[in-house]
Image (tube, rainbow, N blue to C red):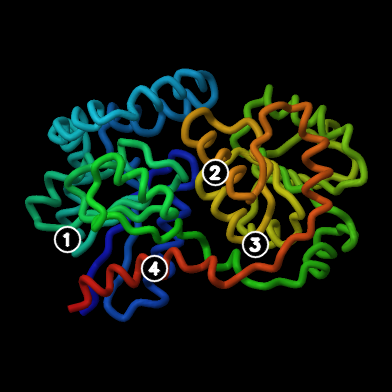
Amino acid sequence: MKKKVLLLSISCGNGHIRAADALQNYINSNSTYLQATHIDIAQYLHPIAKYIHKTNYAWMKKYARHLWFFLYYLNNTKGFTAFLHATTQPHSTLSRKLQEIIKKENPDIVICTYYGAVYMIHNICADMNIPVYTVMTDYHAHHIYAYKHTSGIFVPSVQQKQQLRNCDVPNERIFATGIPIDESLLQQSNKQKIMSTYNIVPCDTVVVVNVHNYSKRTLAKLLRTLHSVQQRTYIFVGKKINIELLPHHSINIPWTNNMEDIYTMADVMISKSGGLTTTECIATHTPLIAYAPMPGHEVQNAKYIDAHGYGVYCKKTKDLPRLINTYTKKSKPSRHPKSLSAAKNILHILEKKYSK
């Protein structure tokens, strides 16, 4: 009988959900010893806990970005982490329905793609002797990940591994695996055929603009700027936009489940630098122009891609035309199967330890 892996994420942004989905699909398609199930914990939280972990972040993202910046860096201390370690009981009390789910599922392993879930489930998992792992979905190791009772932390790269070691996490509990993404994004596709499907001339330069999490004010400023950059085809994804506001040669795709097509067509992407978007751009070799990232974790992601040559952190709107021209002139390398290794690496670690 296969051992059960329970993946816990939260629908606060899409990154935690997408990482868990990708890992679940990879485990269930490739493992002889493990079977994975994925749940969104938001539906099992007390209203107070749901406000703290989901609603409050969504509100700050729209209306109080500087407050999030303040909290992000204020909490990035050993002292605050110690405080969280001491408050696992209140977290458990506010997530009793989640405790019942864990009892019902009785998993052999729990993996959290949302760090906050670890604090909610520690007591019940300790009582049931269930190992708990965390997947870091950003490119900066915040102290909040340094939870002393986790069995292991899967991080994007050796850089974050060193950062966690500086937070006093033992080296043997940190695994530089990468961040899991949907393997369909790495499949080789016929770019000209896909572009023809969307009525785009195959020789056109395509700029994909992910507007899903932009405020009305930020989006309006972005659209005004893009009107000045001609001879490009723009694909706006993630939100419906009034056609009269779009630049010439634009396509608006409010929602799609075929992001592999979008990345295939993209010569460059303009987006906030969420952890999964950043990872997908790196994996598909799509240069990312990180525009108006959320202060804190997304700014750290933007700095990471800037430092490693995966794109650029655009700090000023007036720089966008120049950056678009620069990055659309660069040739886009072909996708490499090695980018698929994150889920594979995690599965290898789990099977090596729990297949007996």
**Is 329 situated left or right of 52 in this image?**
right
The amino acid on which the numbered mark 1 sits, given as a three-letter code, is Asn
Question: Residue 176, how many percent across, how many down?
Answer: 38, 58
Q: Which residue is mark 1?
A: 106
Residue 260 is marked as 3
- Tell which circle, 1 or 4, labels the residue nearer the N-terminal end: 1
CA separation, marks 2 and 4? 22 Å
Question: Residue 146, how many percent across, how many down?
Answer: 27, 41
Q: Quadrant of residue 175?
A: bottom left
State whether residue 235 is above or below residue 1. above
- Say which of 239 and 352 sits in front: 352
Residue 304 is marked as 2
**Which residue does the image show at 34% across and 29% down from the upper left?**
76
- Tell which circle, 3 or 1, labels the residue nearer the N-terminal end: 1
The amino acid on which the numbered mark 3 sits, given as a three-letter code, is Glu
- Tell which circle, 2 or 3, labels the residue nearer the N-terminal end: 3
